[in-house]
Image (cartoon, helix red, strand yellow):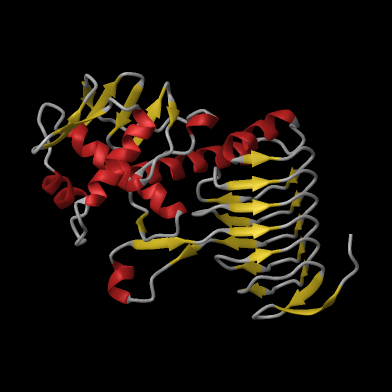
Amino acid sequence: MQNYRFDRFEYRSIERQLRADGRPVAIGPRTLEVLAVLLERHQAVVTARELLDLVWADSDVEESNVQVQVSLLRRALGRDAVVTVPGRGYRMGLPVQEIGPASLDLSPPSIPECAFVSVELGRMLSGELYDARDAGLVAARRRAQRLLANIDACPIDAGQARRSLFEALFGSLGADTEIMPGLRCDYGFNISIGDRSFVDQGCVMHDCNRISIGTETLLACGVRLCTAVRPLDAKQRRSGLESAWPVSIGDGVWIGEGAIVCPGVTIEDNAVVGPGSVVTRDLPANVFAAGNPCRPQRRVDRA
């Protein structure tokens, strides 16, 4: 597999990520697949039928889908990036340079690079079925585990050194937020935590989709925030496909020890979740909720 450079852009085949001036470019998974085909065949014209067969191999879609994706590519890359050849198809309009066989860089990337923009990442964050064995996602998980190992080895009183590691791991980390030892996560960059929050020992955040935690929110020991969803159909599940739904926790929330928050759940501001609860549905603001399944028990005072 080759990597490709054109104008100020670079496409990395294994990670399936597009960068401009070294930073990820956020385009949709189908659009990225169309670009990959055009780059791989940059010395030739690619017909709309070929693009349909390669990009939508398992779907019966109309040729207008190709036109839409080409339009999106031009919007992202520039009007002249993709040329329409009347009656024949499409080709790259910018000079393309092959920059050698693709190799996977497993060194910890800088924060702007941690999004690992790829086809499977796009599917993962949009709630679609995706393949977690994708090379870019594997690299992202390995990066997170290296950072977590460094955090575990860092003294709890190391101050800014420890915080810097969390800032590299998370998508965002608020001021004066404290995270105790034993945190575990999948990717890290899908997690955002607001100011003055507290995450106690042994919390687990399965951040296959976005996990958003507000300001002045408390997570007790052993809280699990889960986003991963496996298909109920055994054949589909055994194929390795999965999906993920985001979790959102508001400001001033307190989640008790050992509670589990399930995929797709939103907990609104100032809610309190009892220890050991399994939260399967959204919780409104200003309630105390407990149980398995977790349900509101009574109102609590407003902040």
Q: Does 300 appear above or below 214?
A: below
Q: Position of residue 44 (x, y in %)?
A: 9, 30
Based on the displayed image, in which of its 4 quarters is residue 12 positioned? top left
Q: Is residue 186 visible?
A: yes
Q: Left of 201 or right of it: where is 272?
A: right
Based on the displayed image, in which of its 4 quarters is residue 264 positioned? bottom right
Residue nearest the viewer, comparing 171 with 31: 31
Q: Is residue 16 visible?
A: no
Residue nearest the viewer, comparing 92 with 83: 83
Residue nearest the viewer, comparing 42 with 139: 42
Q: Quadrant of the C terminus?
A: bottom right
Q: Position of residue 73 (x, y in %)?
A: 32, 36
The residue shown at (36%, 19%) is: 8
Q: Residue furthest front?
A: 86
The residue shown at (45%, 59%) is: 127
Q: Left of 242 or right of it: where is 115?
A: right
Residue nearest the viewer, comparing 16 with 234: 16
The residue shown at (77%, 55%) is: 251
Q: Left of 83 or right of it: where is 17?
A: right
Q: Does 259 appear above or below 118?
A: below
Q: Quadrant of the N terminus?
A: top left
Q: How many marks?
A: 0
Q: Position of residue 69 (x, y in %)?
A: 29, 44
Q: Left of 31 or right of it: where is 298?
A: right
The residue shown at (38%, 45%) is: 28
Based on the displayed image, in which of its 4 quarters is residue 292 positioned? bottom right
Q: Position of residue 13 (x, y in %)?
A: 27, 35
